[in-house]
């Protein structure tokens, strides 16, 4: 029995179509982890550092700041922030990495 390339492709295509190997018509589900801003309340505010007045979106959850970003709808900054404005979250009162007392180095010490 001589099998041509065309006959082989027809047979293989028909077999795959009938058996449905690798075909799924179900809607795929996302397996991504929930983000930290999911379910957070968004409040628009103004950056306190200079007189430009850049608009900032503050995401809060349970009364705590969880994320800050520039407001893309603002005609002033169009979503971009300077280094001071982008570090606003690091200075928030509930950030565990925030310094709570001044650093002190004794006069004449090496460290």
Image (spheres, grey):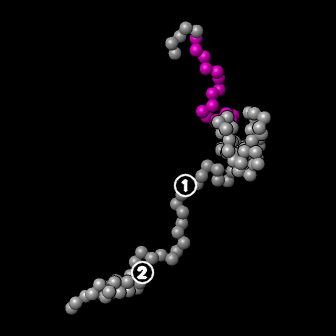
Residue 41: horizontal and vertical position, in percent? 72, 50
In this rendering, would 14 be left or right of 26? left
In this picture, residue 70 sits left or right of residue 15: right
Q: Which residue is nearer to you in this view: 16 or 92?
A: 16
Q: Could you tell me how far apart the alpha carbons at marks 1 and 2 are, in whole angstroms? A: 31 Å
Q: Observer-nearest residue: 30 or 4?
A: 4
Rendering coords of residue 38 (x, y %): 64, 53
Q: Is residue 88 above or below residue 104?
A: below
Where 86 sits versus 19, above or below? above
- Segment tinted magenta in the rendering: 87-106
6 or 90: nearer the eye?
6
Q: Residues within 10 Å of mark 1 (few under 14, many from 20)?
A: few
In the image, residue 100 sits, relative to residue 62, either above or below, namely above
Q: Is residue 79 left or right of residue 104?
A: right
One can see residue 19 in this view: no
Kindly identify the residue that appears in the image at 58 percent across and 54 percent down: 34
Q: Residue at x 54, y 72 (%)?
A: 27
x and y, in percent, of residue 4 in the image: 27, 87
**Is any atom of residue 16 visible in this view?**
yes
Residue under numbered circle 2: 20
Q: Is residue 30 magenta?
A: no
């Amino acid at each position: 029995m001589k099998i041509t390339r065309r006959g082989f492709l027809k047979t293989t295509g028909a077999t795959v179509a009938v058996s449905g190997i690798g075909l799924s018509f179900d809607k795929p589900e996302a397996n991504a982890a929930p983000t930290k801003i999911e379910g957070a309340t968004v409040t628009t505010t103004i950056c306190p550092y200079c007189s430009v007045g850049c608009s900032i979106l503050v995401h809060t959850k349970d009364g705590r700041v969880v994320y800050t970003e520039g407001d893309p709808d603002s005609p002033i900054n169009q979503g971009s922030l300077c280094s001071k404005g982008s570090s606003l979250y690091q200075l928030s009162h509930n950030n565990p990495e925030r310094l709570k007392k001044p650093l002190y180095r004794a006069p004449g010490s090496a460290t």
